[in-house]
Image (cartoon, grey):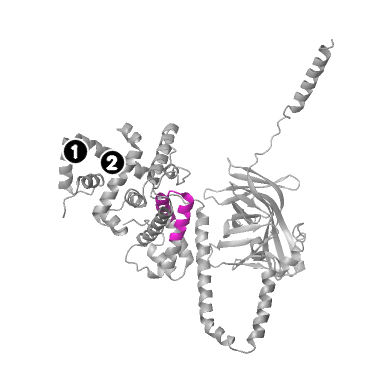
Amino acid sequence: MPAAASTDPGEVSDLDLVKRSQAGDTRAFDVLVTRYRGRIYAMTYHLIQNETEAWDLAQEAFIKAWRALPTFKHDAGFYTWLYRIAHNVSYDWLRKKKIQGDGEFDDERVEHRIAVGAEATPHGDLAPDTALRNAELGQRIQAAIATLSPEHRQVIVLREVEGLAYEEIAALIPCSLGTVMSRLFYARKKLQEQLHDVYETSL
Amino acid sequence: MKHPSEEHDLIRWIDGEMNETERATFEERLKLEPALATEAQKMRSLSASLRSHMPAEIRVPHADYFNTQIEVRITQMALDDARSKQAATSWSAMFQWLTQPWFALVGAAALAVLGFFLLQPASADDSESMILSSYTPNLRVQARTYHDHEADATVLMLDGLDAMPADKHISGVNIQRSEMEPELASTTMYDEKGAAVFMISHDSLGNPLISPEG
Amino acid sequence: MKVFLPVLGLLFCAATVCAQEAPPQAVMTSVKHATDGHVWGALIFATNDSEKLTGGKEPEHADLPKLHERLAKVFPFKHFEVLGQHRQDIFREYESWIVPSQDLFMKIDSKGPAEKDGLNLHLQVWRRHQVLVKSDAILRKDSPLFIGGPPWKNGRLIFVVYLERT
């Protein structure tokens, strides 16, 4: 399952914060938001490929989590539970957009301003041309992912970003293990086609 | 268990989902099938690139605002819930009033008042300053916010602050201009006569330092 | 000669124009940073005991009529005086400080314009080395913000913030 943030010895645990939140303590919930907003936003961003929408959906996920706190049973970790909510919010949005759209996803429909990988990963030690190539590759990857359908984008994000095992992906979606593997294979194949010039020359 | 297809073998090998025996067998195949080995290498390389360019955590733009917007919406939800509960309990009482003979008169008067307000210019709420959210690090301090219509001002009242010592001399200045030096992360402030009065910079924790110390 | 004089005149005019267009002697000015607004901040002492007053002026601002009376409607005191004031541009990219006094001052971070001629901002009120409150707010013209600060000499310190222009 997605790993929760490891807390420093002096930090309040998720369990304490969740219990206080369940009692109505919005400050405790605020700490949880701060603790996990970066990861939730990353997940929504990678799925949605749009900064503004991802920001709104990440907010929506936390609001839904607050609403659903009375039902949280502490049997799984808070982050795992939150992640599931955020994933469902984002995936539902994506599918709705596909239904409302004209058909296949393509990279002209989806806007993204910068190569997120370039922003999140410090490149201070790279030579300027290497940093630029890295940023360009990041943008190419973002554009390629944007061409994937929601189902294929979903497995790529859950595997490559969150590092979930096949069984965990199957439980989250939900679907069979075989479907997870088939979708992963297809998604990677499609990305390879989009990025063939990068990987032809890199070998 | 059904034997996995070749595509699944490739995926499972790349993702480290094979056991020792399966991995050894597959790697033997890779040695004998160069095309498969090339495909596997490319796909592995792609996977590594994806992980590298899709970070698991991204800094949220306007992070403080992100949090406070959530807080505002949660507060609003709580208010809406409280209002709807109140409305639900008073419905039955309301229906009883409808059967009273004097209701027609009261109803007419209420409609007149409602009409008066509806004909008024739009509420001034959206032209007032607003406090969207506040946080007091000291738990003994409470922040209350409201708009005072008589004073025509938005108020942020901090209750529970420790008093300033009565014998403390609190003096002020009249700053009319400031100059910022981003490279030095400092700002110099000038009074109405153009004399430098303060310089504000930061300590190692980012807390403000005003010099000269008063 | 007939041609020479007009040409000379033309050259003379051109030279004059060029001299006028030449950039003036460079003057050292501070770099202009982008701003989202301009505020007035004042630290006010409110008290019922006139003997506790320090000799400051009554609070007044050209755009805030009857400021004294308005303060009195919120804070139950008879006397109000300005201890310090500060007019400050609110920078778009950097933090801005409103320091009418070293004892109570404010940091403002602009979050950009808000509708109805307002300014979205994050503000922090500081008392020396301690932050008293952090707030997200929308400031609008003609709508001051009164912040009730710490008690002092049986009275109260009040921070007034007013958006003079966007």
Which of the pair B173/C61 is nearer the observer? C61
Ranked by sequence position, the earlier of labels 2 and 1 is 1
> Within the magenta stretch, is there residue A104?
no
Q: Is residue A39 magenta?
A: yes
Total labels drawn: 2
Residue B33: x percent and y percent?
18, 36
Q: Residues within 10 Å of mark 2 (few under 14, many from 20)?
A: some
How far, Cα to Cα, is label 2 from label 1? 13 Å
What residue span does the magenta drawing correspond to? A37-61
Residue pointed to by mark 2: B44
Residue C154 can be seen, yes or no: no
Say what secondary structure mark 2 lies in.
Answer: helix
Of C53 and B5, which appears nearest the observer? B5
Q: Chain of mark 2?
A: B
Callout 2, which amino acid? Arg
Q: Are marks 2 and 1 on the same chain?
A: yes
Q: Which mark is residue C146?
A: none
Extreme residue toward the bottom, this view: B101
Chain of the residue that carries numbered disc 1 in the rendered image: B
Residue A16 located left or right of residue C30: left
**Is residue B125 in view?**
yes
Determine whether C58 is above or below B191 in the image.
Answer: below
Taking depth in this image into account, of B71 and B34 the one nearest to the observer is B34
Q: Secondary structure at mark 1?
A: helix
Inspect the image, locate mark 1, and give the three-letter code of the amino acid beneath it: Leu
Check disc 1 and report the residue beneath it: B30
Q: Residue at x 71, y 33 (%)?
A: C27
In the rendered view, would you say B6 is above or below C42? above
